[in-house]
Amino acid sequence: MTTPATSSTASEKLTRKDFVAPGDVRWCPGCGDYAILNALQRTLPELGVPRENFVVISGIGCSSRFPYYLNTYGFHTIHGRGPAVATGVKVANPDLSVWLVTGDGDGLSIGGNHLLHLLRRNVNVNVLLFNNRIYGLTKGQYSPTSPLGTRTGTTPMGSIDPPIDPVLFSLGAKVGFIARTVDNNPNHMIETFKAAHRHQGVAFIEILQNCVIFNNGTWDNVYSKENRDDHLLFLKKGQPLLLGRNNNKGIVLHGVHPRVVPVGENGVPVEDVMTHQPDHESPLFVRMLALMGPPGLPLPIGILRQRSRPTYESQVTAQIEAARKQNGNGSWNELLCGPASWTVE
């Protein structure tokens, strides 16, 4: 467990330096984790939360070093079990701002069961899932998000496992806040992290991240300088789904399938382009966005879904208060030696 060096107050003006832990940061040169760490260190001081009220929790993997590199409270747990610890921390102390850092291997393989239950329960935890589509810490095995045909040391003939889509995974658990961002756009990451913090309920953020050693360039077809204008679709609530350097392309429905069409003088009017509706009650709109991606369609970036429902910890607290009101505070002795126990002579 890591702890912050000093405490702070809600009125104290915090800066990024307050969240930089002593010691060296050790990732491979050029790793996308550096950019994500910097973005989170820049985000936390702007949330109006005392530093001692932040808790960062991780499992195992390159991303899971985050608790060491952030000057907050933190737990570096065992493989895939971060969601269980995060649930316990938030239920025990709902006033804490809890951030769970995981990867596509830690969160969707050995931790898939634990992550699923954190999401479906709607615990008010911010989940940052780094997706580089490979196992980095254990030296380049294919992961649950590796595309079909990926050649690694464990799949020398190419992966035959259909990959998991993190957005569809979270949508299936009825998550209220689902977002996607990229490691080479710090401002977009910061705004996404802030929006996740404001949301009351579990917030799931997939971060497209590059592993320079074992899967370098895995997202270049989406966010490289030469591809991002036509292959990234930045989502803004209530705004048309436009892309291209001059927003000269848009998304329209052809039957039940989205299509990219020219917009403007040589295409359809902007009024005919689909509008982003992250708060729509039907999950079908988000499912459509989740299924989009190259080569035929752009990949949506931003907040895909945002709807509220009661949080898990608020309901647990309400049940405890109702039980106390009905039965009194009780005692440990009554709990251990109540009507459901007996004495063996």
Image (tube, helix red, strand yellow):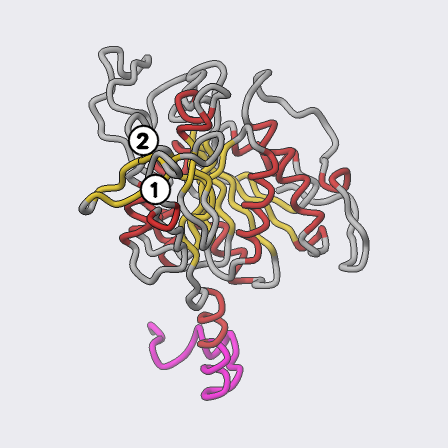
For residue 290, what is the image quadrant?
A: top left
Instruction: Please say whether residue 330 is one of the residues in the magenta stretch.
Output: yes
Instruction: Please say whether residue 49 is one of the residues in the magenta stretch.
Output: no
* Local SS, label 2: loop
CB under 8 Å between callouts 2 and 1? yes
Tell me residue 288's x, y (percent).
28, 45
Tell me residue 191's x, y (percent).
58, 45
Residue at mark 1: 112
2 or 1: tag closer to the N-terminus: 1
Q: Is 230 placed left or right of 1 in the picture? A: left
Tell me if I can see residue 117 in this picture.
Answer: yes
Tell me residue 324's x, y (percent).
50, 83
What number of labels is visible?
2
Tell me residue 321's x, y (percent).
50, 80
Q: Residue at x 35, y 46 (%)?
A: 273
Marks 2, 1: nearer the viewer:
2
Decide: few, some or many residues near mark 2? Use Cα within 10 Å; few <14, some 14-19, many ≥20.
many
Q: Report the magenta residues as a range.
A: 320-344
Name which residue type carries label 1: Gly
Q: Residue at x 60, y 29 (%)?
A: 35
Is residue 236 or residue 328 the one in the foreground?
A: 236
Is residue 160 or residue 322 the one in the foreground?
A: 160
Q: Is 235 placed left or right of 90 in the picture? A: left
- The quarter of the rendered structure image containing the N terminus is top right
Q: Residue furthest front?
A: 265
* Local SS, label 1: helix
Residue at mark 2: 144
Q: Residue at x 40, y 51 (%)?
A: 276
Is residue 179 or residue 140 the one in the foreground?
A: 179
